[in-house]
């Protein structure tokens, strides 16, 4: 009897723990290099699905949509910051690193979400914004109390605003200086981003320890990795640009050492919007970050498809240094920010503005605040080609939420909010995002003629095998049939026709040939494939066999924006 009662109590406790999400996090079978084979989906909890009809997406809502993401075929979710925050930079202004913004749910909801994601084999990468906090964070509130407060030098203070003169301003449309006056303690504080985001002082060992405690908190709960926001700017030094300093790398290496020691298998993804040669040190000798975004590749993909010329892509990849085997580039077409044009020349920037942002409202800071589909004029051929390249160029691909259905944007919403509108699930008033009245939503659903939810939504696209969504699922499935895409080398083929971008991906005995027509017109191309004489190309989407490769140049014809992936079969 007693035993039975005890068991019943145990069961009850376990159920309660499950409901509250407090059960130990289920984990996915260990695979140390999982991030190299991942297909990442980037989303914001706020924008995805609202479970309690308050007009704001939340963790319970996201948990309900995990089946959709699993079915899409992605393997890892990267979540934008979901911590308590005044939301003046959509959560990148963190007021408390170890809790959940009440609009999105509770820590229990987060744990339940994480367990369910892991149960479905999905890994979760979250954000650590380590360069700065919100000015509402308790650390800053203390620091500004007085000049002799023990937390004072957790931030960077000066009597005048003329220090670090060589440092550029990042949010050029809002900020005139990287110093802001604090009327409470009557000194200036340093900030690389908005003035309400004071930079932490990483010269202070206590700050390093405090951020490590934050990491530990989330790693113990079970997250699989962190996107490290704005990493180049951790440390500043007079007389330098204060970007990518050795002291910054030392801090990152310390975090990596500790994470490897206590939480093997978890990863760092560096956000360093820099040239490939300057990003290279963020990988270290495989002892710093596991992954880093390839920022300069992204605008060049848009340039190439507009110029109908492969040169921008080939050039930047040829300038990209080798990285350690255990490391990986993270590649993407769009994200939650403006399409950044920091990593292009002045001429290229003018070209990009002219080609993709004629209307000045589309421009923001040094970039373009538009989504993938509108940038590509809603042309599904171009949407497919760009995604085809995303899935076949070297690196781990990241899909920005909504781009898998070709969602539109609203450039009139201010800042970057136009690319962060509610996910469009159905053709209803609120796009099936929420049961709240449309006017209560955290942001209006896109309502223009081309991209409103009646036209673009998950529900209708799920019913058509020919929709962008169904096609994306097939593309992802095909990519997952081979590790060549995620781990193989790349060699370019150099046909005379510059409208065609062709490359060979190779891993051990496996060889895949990718041929992309970047042009709006049909093209014929002759490829020198003599190195593969005797092989038979098998087109991977349809499984059809193409003529055997011989001595002569291999002739292919491609319709506008067509592309093929061929597995080369040796007989
Ligand atoms: C994020 C931005 C954010 C900035 C400041 C970044 O690089 O991607 O969305 O505004 O950091 O936190």
Image (cartoon, rainbow, N blue to C red):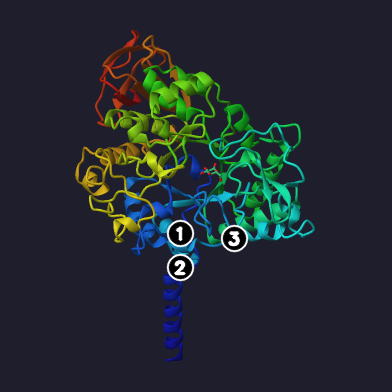
Q: Are marks 1 and 3 in contact (CB under 8 Å)?
A: no
The quarter of the picture where residue 400 lies is top left
**As rendered, which of 340 and 15 lies closer to the eye?**
340
Say whether residue 267 is visible. Answer: yes
Label tally: 3
Q: Are marks 2 and 3 in contact (CB under 8 Å)?
A: no
Disc 2 or 3, which lies upstream in sequence? Answer: 2
Residue 419, numbered circle: none
> Which residue position is annotated with label 2?
21
169 in relation to 157, above or below: above
Crowding near the residue tagged with mark 2, few <14, some 14–19, many ≥20 C-alpha atoms within 10 Å: many
Quadrant holding ligand 1?
top right
Q: Do the residues labelled 2 and 1 touch (CB within 8 Å)?
A: yes
Residue at 70% across, 47% down: 189
Percent from the top left, x then y, of residue 444?
Answer: 34, 50
Percent from the top left, x then y, of residue 406?
Answer: 31, 39
SS class, disc 2: loop
**As rendered, which of 72 and 478 lies closer to the eye?**
72
Say whether residue 501 is visible. Answer: no
Crowding near the residue tagged with mark 1, few <14, some 14–19, many ≥20 C-alpha atoms within 10 Å: many
> Which residue position is annotated with label 3?
217
**As rendered, which of 227 and 551 lies closer to the eye?**
227
- In space, the residues marked 2 and 1 are separated at their CA atoms by 9 Å
Residue at 47% across, 53% down: 29
The quarter of the picture where residue 170 lies is top right
268 in relation to 263, above or below: above
Residue 114, numbered circle: 1
Percent from the top left, x then y, of residue 11?
Answer: 42, 78
């Amino acid at each position: 009897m007693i035993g039975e009662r005890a068991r019943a109590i145990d069961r009850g406790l376990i159920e309660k723990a499950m409901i509250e999400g407090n059960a130990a996090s289920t984990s996915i079978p260990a695979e140390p290099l999982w991030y190299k084979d991942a297909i990442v989906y980037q989303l914001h909890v706020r924008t995805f699905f609202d479970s309690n009809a308050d007009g704001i997406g939340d963790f319970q809502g996201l948990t309900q949509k995990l089946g959709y993401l699993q079915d899409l075929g992605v393997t890892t979710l990267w979540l934008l910051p979901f911590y308590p925050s005044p939301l003046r930079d959509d959560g990148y202004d963190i007021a408390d690193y170890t809790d959940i913004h009440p609009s999105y749910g509770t820590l229990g909801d987060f744990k339940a979400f994480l367990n369910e994601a892991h149960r479905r084999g999905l890994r979760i990468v979250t954000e650590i914004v380590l360069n700065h906090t919100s000015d509402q964070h308790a650390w800053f509130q203390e620091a500004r109390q007085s000049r002799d407060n023990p937390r004072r030098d957790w931030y960077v203070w000066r009597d005048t605003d003329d220090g670090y003169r060589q440092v550029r301003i990042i949010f050029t449309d809002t900020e005139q200086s990287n110093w802001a006056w604090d009327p409470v303690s009557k000194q200036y504080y340093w900030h690389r981003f908005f003035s309400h985001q004071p930079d932490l002082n990483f010269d202070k060992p206590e700050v390093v320890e405090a951020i490590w405690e934050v990491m530990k908190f989330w790693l113990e709960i079970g997250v699989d990795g962190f996107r490290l926001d704005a990493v180049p700017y951790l440390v500043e030094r007079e007389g330098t640009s204060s970007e990518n300093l050795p002291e910054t790398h030392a801090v990152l290496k310390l975090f990596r050492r500790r994470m490897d020691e206590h939480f093997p298998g978890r990863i760092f993804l560096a956000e360093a919007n820099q040239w490939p040669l300057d990003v290279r040190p963020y990988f270290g000798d495989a002892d710093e970050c596991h992954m880093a975004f390839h920022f300069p590749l992204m605008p060049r993909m848009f340039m190439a498809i507009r110029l109908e010329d492969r040169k921008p892509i080939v050039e930047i990849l040829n300038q990209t240094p080798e990285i350690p085997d255990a490391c990986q580039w993270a590649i993407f077409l769009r994200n939650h920010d403006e399409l950044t044009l920091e990593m292009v020349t002045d001429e290229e920037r003018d070209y990009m503005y002219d080609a993709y942002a004629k209307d000045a409202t589309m421009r923001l800071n040094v970039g373009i605040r538009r989504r993938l589909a509108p940038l590509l004029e809603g042309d599904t051929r171009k949407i497919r080609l760009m995604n085809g390249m995303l899935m076949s160029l070297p690196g781990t691909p990241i899909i920005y939420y909504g781009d898998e259905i070709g969602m539109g944007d609203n450039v009139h919403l201010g800042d970057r909010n136009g690319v962060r509108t509610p996910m469009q699930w159905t053709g209803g008033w609120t796009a099936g995002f929420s049961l709240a009245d449309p006017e209560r939503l955290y942001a209006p659903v896109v309502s223009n003629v081309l991209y409103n939810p009646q036209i673009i939504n998950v529900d209708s696209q799920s019913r058509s095998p020919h929709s962008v969504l169904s096609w994306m699922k097939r593309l992802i499935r095909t990519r997952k049939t081979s590790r060549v895409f995620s781990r193989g080398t790349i060699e370019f083929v150099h046909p005379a026709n510059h409208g065609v971008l062709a490359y060979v991906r190779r891993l051990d005995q496996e060889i895949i040939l990718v041929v992309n027509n970047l042009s709006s017109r049909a093209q014929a191309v002759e490829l020198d494939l003599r190195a593969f004489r005797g092989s038979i190309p098998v087109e991977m989407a349809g499984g059809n066999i193409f003529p055997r490769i011989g001595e002569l140049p291999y002739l292919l014809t491609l319709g506008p924006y067509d592309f093929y992936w061929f597995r080369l079969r040796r007989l």
